[in-house]
Amino acid sequence: MSFLSFASLQERLVEVLRSKVRNGEATERGLAKLTGISQPHMHNVLKGQRLLSGELADLILQKLNLTTLDLMERGEMVAFLNRNAKLEARAVPIPVLEGLLGPGLPLPRQVPSPLVHTVPHQQAVATTQPVVVQLADDPEMRTVFEAGDYVLLDQSETLRTYLQPLNFYIVNTPAGALVRAIRREANELVLLTNTIREGSLEGLPRLSLDHADLLGLVLARVVWLTRRRRWGDWAATS
């Protein structure tokens, strides 16, 4: 697909206006009144002596009930959609951390390694500083994750700060780095083994934030495929 610039779209919009005037669908005065600009200004725009500002172009599109898609040729739109479909189907190699993640184990390290796992493009581009890690056995999480599962980790500081109840996170605890859902109560993080939790949170493990940095405790958000569609199916080496 050839490069389509904003300038090209603006020129096409001007040509739409010229066509309306040539075909008798509108007049310079009527277009000026419709858009709230002076007739001399509209005349100069149609003659190519004045450029449309972005604000004026948006106003004209709105008044004519058009969008920028209406200014694109059919072939351009088809090429654009086909290109995006190919990108979304493409797999992207993501580095695998060294070591297993789970109770009683040292935190896996990100070291230079030829081992990668390919991840669907759509997931990869939506993830901040993506890495893949393999999970060790965690008896409390066996109903959700299995030992040997590979998960994609999103290290976005925003996602680790504004915790969502339906997500799993990698939490740095005294027992090791664990996959857990999180609820925040006052200045504590309540750790859960399932994202669906009703009723009291009494008696559940907690981490205090009194003398700890939230981002030092919540290391990543887990982006997980279903158990039956395992990352190992896409294993590759660079």
Image: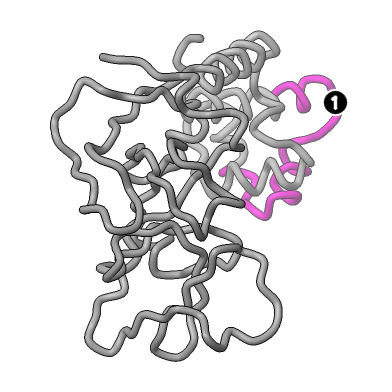
Dominant secondary structure of the magenta stretch?
Answer: helix
Q: Which residue ends up furthest to the left in the rendered image? A: 112
Residue at the image point whose x is 61% and y is 45% from the top:
58
Magenta-colored stretch includes residue 20: yes
Residue at the image point whose x is 65% and y is 49% from the top:
59
Indicate whether 216 appears above or below 23. below
Q: Nearer the viewer, residue 69 or 81?
A: 81
Percent position of residue 10, x then y: 54, 30
Q: Quadrant of the C terminus?
A: top left
Q: Amino acid at mark 1?
A: Gly
Percent position of residue 19, x then y: 74, 21
Packing grade of label 1 (10 A; few <14, some 14-19, many >=20) is few
Total number of numbered discs in the rendering: 1
Percent position of residue 6, x then y: 48, 30
| Left or right: 95 as drawn, with respect to 12 | left
Among the 4 quarters of the image, the one containing residue 119: top left
Q: Which residue is mark 1?
A: 24
Query: Which residues lie in the magenta part?
Result: 18-41
Indicate whether 174 appears above or below 105. below
Q: How is the image coloured?
A: one colour
